[in-house]
Image (cartoon, helix red, strand yellow):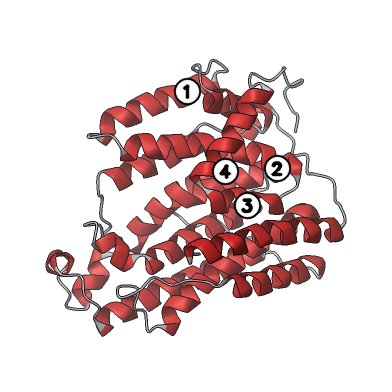
Amino acid sequence: MMGDGGVAPGLATRADLEACREAIRVGSRTFHAASFLLPIRVREPALSLYAFCREADDAIDNASDPAPALVVLTDRLHRAYRGEPIDSAADRALADVMRRFHIPIDIPAALLEGFAWDAEGRRYEDLSDLRAYATRVAGTVGVMMSLLMGVRAPHALARAADLGVGMQLSNIARDVGEDARMGRIYLPLRWLRDSDIDPHQWLQRPDFDPRLGRLVDRLVAEAEQLYARAATGVAELPVECRPAIHAARLMYAQIGREVQRHGGDSISSRAVVSARRKMFLLLQAITVSSHGGPPVDAGPALPEAAFLVDAVVRHDRQHGVVAEQLGESLLAREFSLALRAFERLERMDQRSGTV
């Protein structure tokens, strides 16, 4: 992807890239296995990007005060952006990825901000506030993945942000009980009060209540709307990337449906998508990818995510960046890669019993 006269030799060594892969293989087995759904030209930079994000999340989570940790991480990010990373495999790999794929610094900076919001236990008054959080911790990832695939059109980036936000809402719906037992609540506080549930009192004793179940179902419905919008943007991606993105959309949507199947009760148990169901959804993703999809929704991004799209547009205008999509490849090859990846996921499911 060019537009500024060439790409300088990379800062990251092969050993750095291997270290990033190993960190993800150990620290996030599901992401590592799922990455095999992507073509190698996207998989390699995606693992590098995720390695830094994982380090950053852990650094903020483990800090007694997230504010100083955020300052340090922001400095690391700016140094990587300038091509002067600290002596770290993840930072050198990040510097290469940001330069090669023209990722505006505003996007990973927003992700770091979202990590800090998590660490400080921030709560969200209404749906807009919750979307602002989901945009930072997941919409950013959707947009960056789109950039790794060579897709920079504003409407396509808007749909990528939709997918990320929807996936985070599904996560929140699934983890209401788990979060509450750690003293965290992500459901909009106004929703709770409007249902005569006092958030503070409920956190003291987070039992299931049908009123709460209706709120969880409402959050799942919000996610479903975003998945429907996101589905229209997948056709904008290179054909070899579409199965992975459709699979992510379908599997996270299934998480929400599993929660709804239990009446919105994600307090008493945690929704799980079986390996058999994952395989069915994978086949569905490949089928949808090979037969096209709905007409592209060229509407704007969510108001809370518009700044991500604006950052790319502004960056591209300033640097003369022109998108360069990956070449298309046979879906049969992607199908083979996908089956191998999900065989790994199935083995993991058998060991852990989780999504």
Disc sitting over residue 78 in the figure: 1
Location of mark 4 (residue): 25
Cα separation, mark 4 vs mark 3, equals 8 Å
Q: Quadrant of the N terminus?
A: top right
Location of mark 2 (residue): 42
Of the residues shown, which amino acid type is indicated by label 3?
Answer: Ala
* Quadrant of residue 297 within the rendered picture: bottom right
Seen from the viewer's position, the closer of residues 7 and 180 is: 180
Q: Are marks 3 and 2 in contact (CB under 8 Å)?
A: no
Which residue is drawn at the image coordinates 24% and 67% (left, top)? 190
For residue 225, side relative to residue 241 (left or right): left
Position of 31 relative to 221 (above/below): above
Cα separation, mark 2 vs mark 1, equals 23 Å
Seen from the viewer's position, the closer of residues 178 and 115 is: 178
Position of 187 relative to 97 (above/below): below
Of the residues shown, which amino acid type is indicated by label 2?
Answer: Val
Q: Which of marks 1 and 2 precedes in the sequence?
A: 2
Q: Which of marks 3 and 1 precedes in the sequence?
A: 3
